[in-house]
Amino acid sequence: MRQLIEQRIQQGGGKEPADLVIRNVGLFDLVTGEILPGDIAICGDRIVGTLDRYEGKREIDGTGKIAVPGFIDTHLHVESSLITPFEFDRCVLPHGVTTAICDPHEMANVLGGEAFDYFLGCASRTIMDLRVNLSSCVPATPVETSGAILDAASLIAYRDHPKVIGLAEFMNFPGVLSGQPDCLDKLAAFAGGHIDGHAPLLRGKKLNGYLSAGISTDHEATAAEEALEKIRKGMTILIREGSVCKDLEALAPLLTPETSQFFAFCTDDRNPLEIAHEGHIDFLIRKAIGLGVKPLAAYRAASLSAARAFGLRDRGQIAPGMRADIVLLDDLETCQVAQVFSAGRLVDDALFDSRDLVPPTGYGSVRLAAPITEQDFVVAGSGEQRAVIGIIPGQIITAFRRFDLPSVDGRVLPDVAQDVAKICVIARHGKNANIGRGFVQGFGLKEGALASSVGHDSHNLCVVGMSDADMALAVSRLTELGGGFVAVDGGRVIAELSLPIAGLMSDQPFETVRDDLEALRRAVSGMGGTLEEPFLQLAFLPLPVIPHLKITDLGLIDVDTMTLVP
C-alpha cells in the first residue's frame, strides 16, 4: 500500500505519466455547476489529477464529452430485476451505474443466509461495486408464510464483510415503535452503523420515534409534504422511480441545489425491458431535469449525496483521491451516456468477459403441498360488500374498497364490468397448504389468468384471473418451471418467463429476459390488461407492510390494523 500511495502522489503531481489520462474533457463541477476544461488523470483505480494537463501511459480523447461521477443506485433488490447479479452488472453498468446498494431480502425470504452467501460472492466479482445491506425483516411480518427466518445473530455473522454496508430497510416500523424484542436486537447490533428506513406515510411523533432508533434513509416517501418533513428531521430521501413505484414527479419540486444534500436516487427496481426502453439511474436524471430540476441538483443526488448518505467517502466526485468511477456524456441535460469507467477501467464486453462467475443457487425452491386444481380457488359466501384490493397505478400503496360482486350457487365470482378479478396466494415453501383468496380491481382483464412466483416479500405464488380453470393451469405451469411469470388464456399457456433461481431470477442473459417480458406484456394486453407492468404490480399485492389492503397465503390483510379481513 505504501508503494501504491507513493505512485499516486507521483502521478498526481505530474512527476510520472499517469496510468490513464482522459484528455480535453469538460468536467461538470458538483460544487458550482460549471463545466471546467482539462484532463482527468488516473492511477490504477483512483483519480489523481483534474483541472490541469497530464501525460499518460494510455490516453483517451474526451473532446466534446462532459465528465460526471459514476451514478449510485442507493436501494434496489437485484432479484427484482429478474436477472442474476452478473447480468445486472452487464445490463446497467453501461448506463453509468458504477455503484449499486442492494438488499437481497427477496432471495433471503426464500433461502435465508444462503442468499447472503450468494450475493456477497457475486459482489466480490462484479465489475461495478455492488454493496449489500443485510435484510432486516425476514420474514417481513407474521401474517404470511416465509421460506426462512433471520434473527439478529444470523445478521451479525455477515456484519463485518467488506461488501456489507449495514442493515437494510427496516420495514417493520410498527415493531420498532412498539419495541418488539427482535427489532430492538437487530437495531442494537447495527447501532452506530448504517440502517436503512422504510416508513410509508409515517409522520409526526411516530416518525420521531422511528428515527431515534438510528435509522437514516427512506425510499417510501410518495408526496412532497411527507418528504419535506423527513428531510427536515435529518433523513436522506431516496427518490424512487422503478418499474412499478414512480415517485419522481411528486418529489422533483423539492430537489434543488440547496436541498440536494438530503436527496439521492434509487430504482427499487427496474426490469430489463424498462431499462432497454428508458434507462436506469440515467433515466432518473434525465426525467428529473425534464421536470425542471437543475442539473447540479440532479447529478449531486445521483452521486455525491448518495455516496455520503451511505458512508462511501471515496466516490461521488471527480477529484484526486476518489475512486475512478467516471461517466462521459454526450449531453448533460439529456444524460446521454457515451463511455463509462469503473474503478479506472473502460467498460466494454471484454471487461465483462474477464469476470469469474459464481454459480447460481436456489433451484427447486417451489414446493407445493399438493397439486393445485380449480376447486382450490373457489370463494364461498355472499358477494355483498366484498373487500377488494384497489390498485393505484404507479404505486404499491393500494386502496381498501368494497364491491357487490356476482355469485352463483354460493360461489362469489369476478366481475368484468367492475374490473374486479379474483386473486389468490398459494404457500410455496413446503411448510403448509395455505391458500389466501380475495378480489382485486385494476388489472383490466377480460379473461384468462396471470401467475407469478415473485410475491414480495415472502414470495409465495400469486395468481390473478377471471377463470378458476385458467388460474389453476397458470399455477401448475409455474410449478413445472420452478418459478417465473405465466399468462394463460382459454386453457392454454400463451406466454411465460422462467425464473428458476429461487423462483426469482432467470439463468439466461438479460436480453432473453427483456424479450420474454415484451412477449408477456403483449399477451396480457391481448387479454384486456391495462397495467404497464402487470406482473410486477401483481408481485406487490402480497406485501403486507404497505397500506392499505393486501393479500397473503393467510388471506386478505388490513395493513392499517395488521389483521385478517373476515
Image: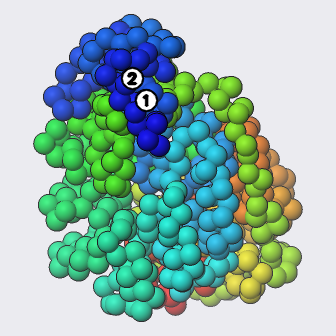
Q: What amino acid is found at the position of numbered circle 2 in the picture? A: Gln
Location of mark 1 (residue): 7
- Quarter of image, res 520: top right
Name the foreground residue: 372 vs 77: 77
The x, y position of residue 165, in whole percent, is 44, 60
Q: How many marks?
A: 2
Q: Residue at x 61, y 43 (%)?
A: 126
Q: Residues within 10 Å of mark 1 (few under 14, many from 20)?
A: some
Secondary structure category for the residue under label 1: helix
Circle 1/circle 2 CB separation < 8 Å: yes
Left or right placement of residue 156 versus residue 369 in this view: left
User: Dividing the picture into quarters, in which one does residue 275 lie?
Assistant: top right
In front here: 192 or 321? 321
Residue 365, x across and y down, in percent: 77, 69
Nearer to the camera, 286 or 531: 286
Amino acid type, callout 1 = Gln
Q: CA distance from mark 1 to mark 2?
A: 6 Å
Residue that appears at 76% across and 61% down: 361
On screen, 478 above or below 298?
below
Q: Residue at x 37, y 50 (%)?
A: 312
Q: Which residue is mark 2?
A: 11
Does residue 408 appear in this view?
A: no
Query: Does dot 2 land on a helix, a strand or a loop?
Result: helix
